């Protein structure tokens, strides 16, 4: 782990446009915990130093967002993060005119904010956004590093500190929701997956404060459920869900019930599948 000093970094969360733009400023206390599994930290730093955009690929809950938060703190940059969804438009990212009282004012969207302030802008699950959204980011991902605001005529030049990071889950996206090659090839890509057993046990222990034997049992349950992915599960048990199980155990639930509630129930609604998952959990818990 990094030896950087603990500090505070502002993080601006997803903006919601409901007649006005609401900004949520969060403070990250200390360095977000992240356990490196390869050379991803060095690769990200090299991309930042050379002003390259980065694409994170991997399953849900494997640590992509935590990694970005960790790297933003490590690099000493503010983080603007946007959780992409079906209704997210280019205007939501860039900004729009709003009527406030007797005047009409321009309000920056999160992407524009990030460019102006030299922040790291993180578009989480970018393929969930509407197609016009990805077109907007293209000029920021080549040597121009510019952003045009058509509605105001302004052209922003991204400062050296600005960085664009996107993430998506290749195994989950359908053919209708995939990242175009014209977009993919503008990014340096880092592959993420669930940690190997020892690393995942260490993560569960750190995040929950549980003893090692209990953490090992939780991780074992996660591994067994992941082996069932080809048997009808759309999504495997994520490291995030294993941590949730540990937190429920720490909160007083017995291990079996904690795993039923936080691992099995979130990944399936099928009664037959849930019955099988509950039976599997019972063999370990």
Image (spheres, rainbow, N blue to C red):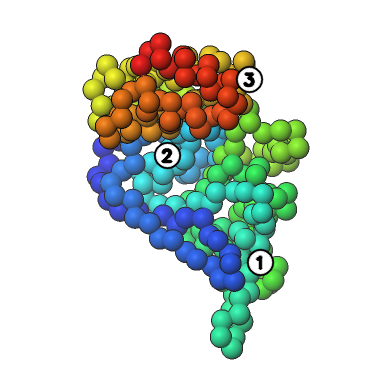
Identify the mark nearer the N-term, 1 or 2: 2
Name the residue: 57% across, 20% down. 273
Q: Which is closer to the viewer, label 1 or label 2?
A: 2
Which mark is on residue 23?
none
Which badge, 3 or 1, is on the more N-terminal residue? 1
Dot placed on the residue nearer the N-terminal end, 2 or 3: 2
Is there CB contact under 8 Å for labels 3 and 1? no
- In terms of secondary structure, where does tag 2 sit? helix
User: Which image quadrant is residue 200 in?
Assistant: top left
Residue found 40% across the figure and 11% down from its top: 283
Q: Please rate how many residues cluster around mark 3, counting C-alpha atoms within 10 Å: few if below 14, some from 14 to 19, many from 20.
A: few
Q: Where is residue 259 drawn, in percent x and y?
A: 40, 25
Identify the residue at horizontal 47%, vertical 64% (top origin).
Answer: 23
Q: Quadrant of the C terminus?
A: top left
Q: Which mark is residue 66?
A: 2
Viewer-nearest of discs 2 and 3: 3
Question: Residue 258 appears at what percent x and percent y?
Answer: 37, 28
Q: Which mark is residue 232?
A: 3
x and y, in percent, of residue 266 in the image: 51, 32
Q: Residue 105, position in %: x, y?
A: 59, 79
Callout 1 environment at 10 Å: few (<14), some (14 to 19), or many (20+)? some
- Element on which disc 3 rests: loop
In the image, is residue 157 above or below residue 209? below
Residue under label 1, please give it.
149
Query: Looking at this view, is 135 or 26 the one in front?
Result: 26
In space, the residues marked 3 and 1 are separated at their CA atoms by: 45 Å
Query: With respect to residue 33, does 264 lie above or below?
Result: above
């Amino acid at each position: 782990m990094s030896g950087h000093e603990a500090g505070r970094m502002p993080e601006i969360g997803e903006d919601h446009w409901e007649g006005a733009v609401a900004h949520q400023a969060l403070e990250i206390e200390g360095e977000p915990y992240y356990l490196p599994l390869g050379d991803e930290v060095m690769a990200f730093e090299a991309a930042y130093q050379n002003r390259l955009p980065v694409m994170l690929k991997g399953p849900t809950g494997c640590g992509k967002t935590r990694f970005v938060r960790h790297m933003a703190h490590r690099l000493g940059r503010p983080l603007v993060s946007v959780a992409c969804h079906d209704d997210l438009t280019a205007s939501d990212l860039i900004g729009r005119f709003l009527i406030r009282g007797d005047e009409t004012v321009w309000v920056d969207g999160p992407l524009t904010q990030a460019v102006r302030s030299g922040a790291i802008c993180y578009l989480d699950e970018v393929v969930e956004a509407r197609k016009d959204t990805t077109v907007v980011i293209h000029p920021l991902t080549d040597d121009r590093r510019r952003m045009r605001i058509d509605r105001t005529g302004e052209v922003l030049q991204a400062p050296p500190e600005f960085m664009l990071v996107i993430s998506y889950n290749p195994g989950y996206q359908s053919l209708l929701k995939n990242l175009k090659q014209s977009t993919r090839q503008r990014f340096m890509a880092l592959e993420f997956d669930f940690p190997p057993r020892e690393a995942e046990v260490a993560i569960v222990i750190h995040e929950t404060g549980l003893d090692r034997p209990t953490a090992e049992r939780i991780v074992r349950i996660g591994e067994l459920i992941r082996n069932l992915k080809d048997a009808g599960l759309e999504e495997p048990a994520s490291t995030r869900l294993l941590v949730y199980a540990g937190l429920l155990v720490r909160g007083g639930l017995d291990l079996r019930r904690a795993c039923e509630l936080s691992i099995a129930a979130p990944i399936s609604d099928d009664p037959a599948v849930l019955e099988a998952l509950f039976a599997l959990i019972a063999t370990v818990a």
